[in-house]
């Protein structure tokens, strides 16, 4: 590998960063939203595989406790918007979409 001056590397890195930023800024908001929703859905199906002990497609507090999902447990009441003590895919994707934490 050829030695490259640090200054040159910094300029290139900055140019890449600016380029990424501009591309992201141009991306339609709706597209970004649907990507996030897809990601949330796949995250939820992973969670179901790991934690949905009774296989009803929703996650109860007990199931999250069993799977040691402390982050989701602490936000349980916030995520469970219909208050049935169980998190379904719709509630999870809405939560992830609102917070973009996961
Ligand atoms: Ca369940
Ligand atoms: Ca619910």
Image (cartoon, rainbow, N blue to C red):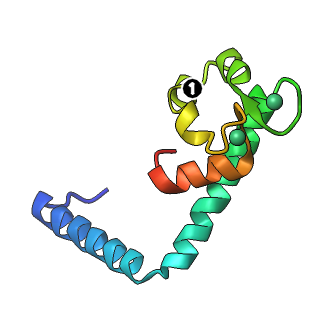
Q: Is residue 30 above or below residue 86?
A: below
* Residue placed furthest toward the front: 83
Looking at the image, which is closer to me, 86 or 35?
Answer: 86
Front residue of this view, candidates 86 and 29: 86
Give the answer, above or below, for where 28 lies relative to 84: below
Q: Quadrant of residue 25?
A: bottom left
- Residue 44: x, y in percent? 70, 44
Residue at image location 19% in from the left, 61% down from the top: 4
Depicted 24 relative to depicted 86: above or below: below
Measured as percent of width and height from the top left, residue 33 is found at: 55, 69
Locate the N terminus and report the quarter of the image it occupies.
bottom left
Q: Residue at x 84, y 39 (%)?
A: 57
In the picture of the structure, the residue carrying the numbered disc 1 is 73
The residue located at (40%, 84%) in the rendering is: 26
Q: Tell me the SS state at disc 1.
A: helix
Q: Is residue 27 left or right of residue 7?
A: right
Residue 20: horizontal and vertical position, in percent?
36, 72
Quadrant in which residue 60 is drawn:
top right
């Amino acid at each position: 590998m050829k030695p490259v001056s640090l200054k040159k590397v910094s300029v290139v890195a900055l140019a890449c960063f600016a380029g990424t930023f501009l591309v992201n800024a141009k991306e339609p908001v709706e597209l970004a939203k649907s990507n996030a929703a897809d990601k949330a859905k796949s995250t939820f199906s992973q969670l179901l595989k790991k934690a949905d002990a009774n296989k009803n497609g929703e996650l109860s507090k007990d199931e999250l406790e069993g799977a040691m999902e402390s982050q989701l447990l602490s936000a349980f009441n916030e995520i469970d918007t219909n208050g049935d003590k169980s998190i379904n895919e719709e509630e999870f994707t809405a939560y992830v979409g609102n917070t973009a934490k996961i």
